Image: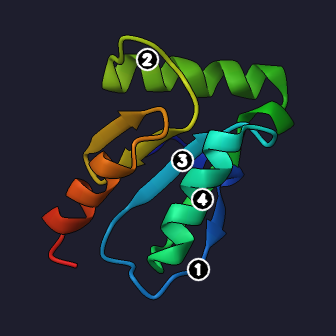
Amino acid sequence: MFPEIIERLAQEVKGENDTHNVIIFTLSTCMWCKKCKVFLAERGIKYRYIDVDRIDISEKSKILEFLRETYKPERISYPFVVWDNEFVVGYNPNKYEELLKLGGN
């Protein structure tokens, strides 16, 4: 589903709820990104993340290009959450709850 660069860089966070494929693109210092990680952890959701401010600029460029071409968002903002086949730009716990319910959990 994701290019090799994302698969290689993504760090996994364990959770008992692994029915969803969740990956978040974050900034290590972003308070909203941290809230997103807490939201997922509190619900036991297994997810992967990449702190894009901690990777090489060329890798960051490739990831941003992939996100723009694949999801066609109006803008890139963090956290950028890919949840199964949906995406959410920015911290939006109400949308995360909707996506969580779509999976039956």
Q: Which residue is mark 3?
A: 24
Whole-Å distance between the Cαs marked 1 and 2? Answer: 28 Å
Q: Earlier in the sequence, mark 2 or mark 4?
A: 4
- Within 10 Å of disc 2 (Cα), the crowding (few <14, some 14-19, many 20+) is some
What's under tag 3, amino acid-wise? Ile
Q: Name the colour scheme.
A: rainbow
Q: Secondary structure at mark 4?
A: helix
Q: Which residue is mark 2?
A: 68
Whole-Å distance between the Cαs marked 3 and 1? Answer: 14 Å
Q: Is residue 101 visible?
A: yes
The nearer-to-camera label among 4 and 1 is 4
What's under tag 1, amino acid-wise? Lys
Q: Tell me whether circle 2 and circle 4 mark residues in contact (CB < 8 Å).
A: no
The nearer-to-camera label among 2 and 4 is 4
Q: Which residue is mark 1?
A: 14
- Classify the position of the C terminus by image quarter: bottom left
> In the image, 60: left or right of 77?
right
Q: Tell me whether circle 3 and circle 1 mark residues in contact (CB < 8 Å).
A: no
What's under tag 2, amino acid-wise? Arg
The nearer-to-camera label among 3 and 4 is 4
Eyeballing the image, is 43 above or below 11?
A: below
Q: Quadrant of residue 57?
A: top right
> In the image, 44: left or right of 74?
right
Q: Secondary structure at mark 2?
A: helix
> Which dot marks residue 37?
4
Q: Earlier in the sequence, mark 3 or mark 4?
A: 3
Q: Position of residue 14 (x, y in %)?
A: 58, 80
User: Which residue: 56% across, 38% down?
Assistant: 79
Whole-Å distance between the Cαs marked 2 and 4? Answer: 22 Å
